[in-house]
Image: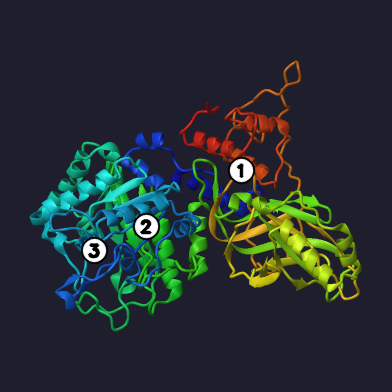
Amino acid sequence: MRTFKKLISAVTASAMTLSMTAGSVSLFGTVNAADLDSMTAVELVEDMGAGWNLGNSLDCYWNDASNGGAWGYKSIEEQERGWGEVITTESLIKSVAFYGFDTIRIPVTWYGHMDSSGNIDADYLARVKEVVDYAYDNGLYVILNMHHDGASWNGGSNWLTGGTAVKDRFTNAWFQIAEEFKSYDRHLVFEGWNEITFDDSTQLAMAQAFVDTIRDSSGNNKKRLLLIPGNNTNYEKTTSSSYQLPTDSANMLAVDIHYYDPTQFTVYSDDDDPWGGGIQPQNSWGSADEIAKVKNDFAALKGRFTDQGIGVIIGEYGVENYNKDEASRVLFTKTVASAAYEMTGVCPVLWDAGDMKYYNRASQSWNNPEVGEFFKELTGGTYVNEDGLVLTDRVTIKGTKDGNAMVWSIEPFRDKAVLKTARWSFDAEGLTEDGYYGLAAFQANQVDTTYEIDEDLLAKEKAGTLTDEEQTELNNQRNTKYQWSYRKTSIAQDPVYYEDDLTEWFHAVDNVDTPYEAPFTLDYDYLKLETWYVGSDGTAPTLTPNENLTLVFESPVWVDPNTFEIPDPVEDETDAPTEEPTAEPATDEPEPPTQEETSAGELQVTIWGDADNDGDCDIIDVICVNKDQLGSYTLDAQGIKNADVDQNGIMAFADAVNIMKSLVDLVTLPVA
């Protein structure tokens, strides 16, 4: 993923007329298992991109002093909520991936769910697996570790600090974990432990025991990437000459360093000396020397590790929230992430929990939106899996005209998406101040296609001459034919545009208006926009709905970009959409080469991947294919022929992915 992202970032940063930022759609997919197996450790870490920590969740611990120091949580759910976070869901993981994160680090504290021999409770291992699958099944990398088993405080259990004295318990636990995940490919990474200060010989002995245990297990563990913590994951200790890595027959090791330097800025607040020593807190950061130190520190990692074939994962970095200059906090985060991300074979993983809170998991939004936008820009945009599906929080659907109404099929999102807002517009004539429109929704399997509504009653309704009894009968007929949902509001503008937060939607059940609790899960196959209420003068306006309906979801969903348009976020969601962009200005560039044809008139490929017909296959061709698919650029017939690199007769986003892969020598064009 990351190799493609770096190419994309370089292109989008240049002042080209052809922009590829439509809907923040990235143009790459996750590397498949076959490609993963051939990667070196440095290449794999490079592909891991940027990461995010699911901290203060499965790593929570509590030893109840009133109960002899026994594990205090009564359930796994209570543990996950123990330090103030929400229960982890797949929706949460996808919402994080939406900002371009390719890796999720899952810290896990095990001691409350295993015995003194290291035997892990089956139900806890099952929950860990469920959370891993939320990320793994969506094509993300996962780092799974042993977290507060050796780095706890205030009554926690530090059993793992016993080092070689507890090696049997340590290796037994890791062997069970490895066997549980033996079928998972290299998207799953194991990290031995977290932030323990060992002496050099104990550090090496425990690291070697970890590596040997995983390699002695079965399945894909023989070649899995293993993350070896630096000594206390400290930069200085880990880059010193005394630090040694274990041997590994698979030569698939990476080192874990946590970057909280200077600690007086990142972790110390006023009147706060969490580790003693009388350190005075620092509330701002960002001098030229401070920024240069970050870059120099990371440059040193190259010679010490990546040049030697060892990947580097910055497993944690960040700045606490309290009493810190926000601009400095954002600058530090950007500086560390950028310095690491721009290096080959280094993956930065943001710590985002507790006092270092960046992302609100309950609302699935950034506390400071600037940080979220930074990561999207750094990583090249939203996530696209190997099937070419885009992870997005909005889609635009084209409707089908049904008389004066418009019908949109939303079946792909039924029971999968939570609708936050809907944006639509229509042209209208004959509006009155007290007229009403409605957005009707119905489920396909609840539609009685044979049931006809009485046309005479419809005519009388339009004329405003229905009796109460007739209106009741007509309502009953409608509810028999459709399962209605609607929103009532006055309309008095032309054209009419709505950004609807759904708070005033109603569900017609037995002719009783029952309010929805919005946002709500889409449980319909179709949406239909029409009017059925009229003005006080008995006339009904004539509405012509526009064909585009944009749905904005509470959290991202997987979408096929070949089926649905993925729109750009609107800067002010309440404003009406701007007019369609005008055609791009003409340039002085030469005309593309003449299209080659056979004697029978059939086009032949000139250069595979050369979508713009400039005589070369390069990154611009990737951009052109995607812009063509997004409707903001049109390729000619020769370009389409050249770009159909999978030779299936259809040019699509998948061809852009393959062209991109060819530029970094992952595939050869045309692809089989």
Depth-wise, is mark 2 or mark 1 nearer the camera?
A: 2
Q: In the rendered structure, which disc, 3 or 2, sits on the residue that comes first in sequence?
A: 3
Residue 210: x and y in percent read 19, 48
Q: Is residue 659 above or below residue 443?
A: above
For disc 1, the neighbor class at 10 Å (few under 14, some 14 to 19, many from 20) is many
Residue 148's disc is 3
Report the coloring of the rendering: rainbow
Residue 137 or residue 526, whichever sits in front: 526
* Residue at 48% in and 71% down: 367
Residue 623's disc is 1
* Residue at 27% in and 69% down: 74
Q: In the rendered structure, which disc, 2 or 1, sits on the residue that comes first in sequence?
A: 2
Residue 547: x and y in percent read 76, 53
Residue 197 or residue 619, whichever sits in front: 197
* Residue at 24% in and 57% down: 146
Amino acid beneath label 2: Val
Left or right of 337 on screen, residue 126? left
* Residue corresponding to mark 2: 349
Amino acid beneath label 1: Ile
* Residue at 67% in and 22% down: 604
Secondary element at tag 2: strand
C-alpha distance separating marks 2 and 1:
29 Å
